[in-house]
Image (cartoon, rainbow, N blue to C red):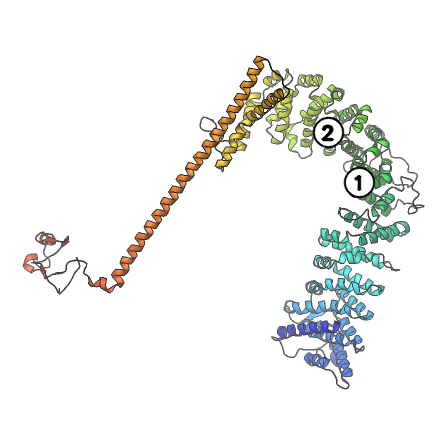
Amino acid sequence: MWTEEAGATAEAQESGIRNKSSSFSQIPVVGVVTEDDEAQGVFKPMDLNRVIKLLEETDKDGLEEKQLKFVKKLVRCYQNGLPLRDLAQIFKILNLCAGKIKNQPHFIESAYDIIKLCGLPFLKKKVSDEITYAEDTANSIALLGDLMKIPSSELRIQICKCIVDFYHAEPPKKHIPGYQQASSSYKIQMAEVGGLAKTMVQSMTLLENQLVEKLWVLKVLQHLSTSEVNCTIMMKAQAASGICTHLNDPDPSGQLLFRSSEILWNLLEKSSKEEVIQQLSNLECLLALKEVFKNLFMRGFSHYDRQLRNDILVITTIIAQNPEAPMIECGFTKDLILFATFNEVKSQNLLVKGLKLSNSYEDFELKKLLFNVIVILCKDLPTVQLLIDGKVILALFTYVKKPEKQKIIDWSAAQYEELQLHAIATLSSVAPLLIEEYMSCQGNARVLAFLEWCESEDPFFSHGNSFHGTGGRGNKFAQMRYSLRLLRAMVYLEDETVNKDLCEKGTIQQMIGIFKNIISKPNEKEEAIVLEIQSDILLILSGLCENHIQRKEIFGTEGVDIVLHVMKTDPRKLQSGLGYNVLLFSTLDSIWCCILGCYPSEDYFLEKEGIFLLLDLLALNQKKFCNLILGIMVEFCDNPKTAAHVNAWQGKKDQTAASLLIKLWRKEEKELGVKRDKNRKIIDFENLPGLSAEDFVTLCIIHRYLDFKIGEIWNEIYEEIKLEKLRPVTTDKKALEAIITASENIGKMVASLQSEIIESQARQDVQNEQKVYAKIQATHKQRELANKSWENFLARTSNAKTLKVPSGGVVTVESTPARLVGGPLADTDIALKKLPIRGGALQRVKAVKIVDTPKKSIPT
């Protein structure tokens, strides 16, 4: 029951209050004021614990009246704000009042009045109060969410009003001496800490058929969702799916849809986008979004309705990016395709019958959003059939033509231009999936005709004021750019039907003509766009001419000229970042695909010093181009005229082609880490680091791999001859047998080398093992000696028997007479010369006498 939960919360809060407040005062200060005091805004002391104790009492006559009286006094005292130091106890009183509501309905008013106070400013006595009472404040605010479980409409609405007031802080009505207002964002921060957003999301399940309360909760969640912290909490509480499934609930005011869409937007922007999309990617949510969008599309006429419709479409587009979203299953994909094309393709569908779009900003944005959602939807292959049924290709091609007055919608010139570019960009994504529809709509012819207009001198003032129109203001570059992108996408499908149709329509000549026209009219202002156009033209030509000699012949000398023009570009421009690198790649690709293999074109390329230009590019020493250039050079060497051009080339400082190639070889060796000695001989081809014996065994096979493959092929030939019972002539037979024998000998040699490697490794393992054993033996010997030394030492210092045994002879030393040494200052060296030496020590003695019991004993 709710009262049990409330009691538990109250008990926990009371414990926290006692711990928190013990350092201040046993009797907290509460405002009980007289009329004079009220005018001055003064708090008078009152024991709040007494109020709590009174509310906890039961079964006394007149108790309820007394309890209600005390609560009213408390409410009157705090009409100007709630001190932070008293907040926990005030909320304990609120919780006690709430717990009595079920059996004592009069306490609803008391709880209502206290909750109303929570909308007032929080007051602090000290600057540190905000930190000191942060935990109490967070727990108290969190209790507001728990109180939503009370089945009282007025109480729930007041709770919501109170929370909304957090975001519209007002100063206290009267100044209270000794107190100041807590910071305006303090309540909002404490709501985040206390997790209020979670309980407010959960309260939605209690309000299924209560529209007013539901709208207030949505208003609260709308405010809470402005915070990333709260959005994360709400997302984890499944707010997105919970709100989305109720988008179609009856609501004459329209607030439910507006607030819900705002919350969904905030959740997508301020929490985990992937998690929110996952929550919304279910049949129930998508059906709700579908119905909302349909209703707004068909019956939304106000400015506000159209904005909301577009917002819902954007949310849908984001969800559609998830391939697991059941867009097709719920029928949403089919409806979106219908709405995207109904203006361009006549439909008898009742959903769009009689519908019209205006040239208002909202309808213009809708049209672009519908084009965009088609691009997203077509990534899901099952959508293809729906695109065919919806005649999407035909609808989009209505924009691929010279601008003219529209019959259905009178778009402005700028609007039409933007839609035209958007439609062509959409075709680049959709048309490669629908080749048959593209060809049935005469797609190639339409695009080529449009390109003719783009190249013509027809006066046309382009606005270039959109994403797709970048760089196209006052010219037709934007239209040409997107048309070429579309052609490039179709050519690179390598569909012979499409490419053959393009060639028959003169595409190769037209592309060369456009390229030459661009060269003749340089445009430095839009240089990046021009370079992209040139790159796409060369890529289209490469796609059309590759593996087709006749098309290479059509490419001819005019095509070679534009290739040579690009190759003469100043090398310094390659570092400009404008796109010269991409253009050079496209150019080299076109040499490979459009020139090589066609001897007239090859000869013309050589005559125009094309090999010199290739070697000049190679000399730039840019690794990203080297492989492609060297590959082209190898192919050109099949032409007998090439060698003379290669030998005739001279680079900077009279560098020759041979020296250039050798220099590149050395650079490659250096990058591979190949080592050489002082004479530049390779010293490690096989000295590769980190190889085991097993690796070297494999390396033997790698070295002879080509020999093995050749032997394998000859062996197969020999077996086939035997199988077919053919008998080669004597000479061929001898040659075949010699080859087979040589192959077998190579195999035996490799096997022998492998055996030697394995045996060598085995011997090395034995030697290593012996070294390890020797080391272990030395270690053990050293330990034995160390142990024996330690035992001897212990015996000499600890064993009584050992100590009784003398370690050597004992002598008695008598003093030497002074006459022998000449007194204390006598010459020591002379004195020593007269003394006998015994036992290796110098002793000044007259005579030495062995005794059993010495007076002074010295071990010798």
Q: Is residue 721 left or right of residue 369?
A: left
Residue tagged 2 = 539
List x then y, in percent, for residue 428. 79, 36
Crowd around label 1: few <14 · some 14–19 · many ≥20 (10 Å): some
Amino acid of disc 2: Leu
In the rendered image, the residue lying farthest to the left is 819
Residue at 75 percent across and 75 percent down: it is 99
623 or 827: nearer the eye? 623
267 or 799: nearer the eye? 799
Using the numbered discs, state the Cα–Cα distance from disc 1 to disc 2 in whole angstroms. 28 Å
In the rendered image, the residue lying farthest to the top is 730
Q: Is residue 791 left or right of residue 705?
A: left
Inspect this view and state whether residue 370 appears.
Answer: yes
Foreground mark, 1 or 2, reads: 2
Residue at 44 percent across and 36 percent down: it is 761
Residue tagged 1 = 465
The quadrant of the picture occupied by the C terminus is bottom left
Which type of secondary structure does the marked residue at label 2 adopt? helix
Determine whether 766 is above or below 259 in the image: above
Inspect this view and state whether residue 558 appears.
Answer: no
